Image (cartoon, helix red, strand yellow):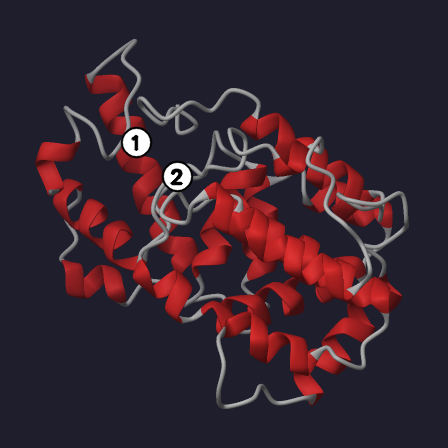
Amino acid sequence: MSRYCGNRSTVGKFELALAWKKQCLINEGSLFTDKSIWTKANINELAKHYFDNAPASDGNFLQRLKVQLSAAPADCQLLCAEILWSMLFCPSNISATTKINTFSIVLSWGDEVLESSSSFADESLIEGFGSGGPGYNTFRQKELSYAIEMMAALLALSASERSDLLSDPLECATWLESIPGNEKRQFRHMFLFMLFPDHYERLFGAGDRVRVAAAFSQFSANALKKKSVFELDGVIRDIRCQYEAKYPGQLLDWYLSPLREYWR
């Protein structure tokens, strides 16, 4: 079962991801307020300010983002904070304290204060599942661009269409192929793992995905790099099925024995 993460506890985490899906992606609510934040109007307004205002050349990610969104309505800034929450939910190489600090800062731009009692700010629940690799931080601007494009396309659908899409692991992955940057962005893998932990893996970096597939399949690394991320999902899924049959009744994870030794 791909939701098994070894000695990293998953208690409550997948339930929290499910709550995000229901409250925000389907019902257009909010993680941190009682407002209707995840709406088509808000995401389109956020996209307009984000993409029309080139980030400054100096400053860190948040400093540049603040300039980009300086003229955006408060609800758009709140939506951006909650998108960042979703982007930071899976990586374990970013501390929970840093995650909370990040979306707390962006919430403050929309005149909101993060309530420490919120389950969406519970350090034990947002500590992550696996490393996003150094590239996830280095290219956070591109990851956010991808996330905004994704959410704009998603919120353009009706609630029933979103519900159907987000209930079908293969249909959702197929739909993601239309989002610009889908082949290169790690948030694509995190998003699918959050929603479908029984179908997708906590393999978020492109390098690890290829190394795992090359070690366990008949494909070379070069051949695998030519496959789409959707096709690579299928290769990895077939490998899991093969090794779950080889080790019946045993919970398996790529980063733990007996699988780890095959590829690392």
Q: Is residue 201 left or right of residue 250?
A: right
Answer above or below: position of 262 versus 135. above
Task: Please name the amino acid that badge 2 sits on.
Answer: Glu
Q: Position of residue 219 (x, y in %)?
A: 17, 53
Using a 10 Å C-alpha cutoff, classify the residue at mark 2 as few (fewer than 14 neighbours), some (14 to 19) or many (20 or more): many
- Res 153 quadrant in image: bottom right
Residue occupying image coordinates x 21% and y 15%: 247
| Depth check, front residue: 81 or 168 | 81
Residue 87: image location, x then y, percent: 55, 54
Secondary structure of residue under mark 1: helix
Residue beneath disc 1: 240
Q: Earlier in the sequence, mark 1 or mark 2?
A: 2
Are the two marked residues, 1 and 2, in contact with CB atoms closer than 8 angstroms?
A: yes
- The label on residue 201 is 2
Number of labels in the image equals 2
Q: Is residue 102 above or below residue 184?
A: above
Can the viewer see residue 167 in this picture? yes
| Quarter of the figure that contains the N terminus | top left
Q: Helix, strand, or loop for circle 2?
A: loop
Foreground residue, 156 or 194?
194
| Alpha-carbon span between mark 1 and mark 2 | 10 Å
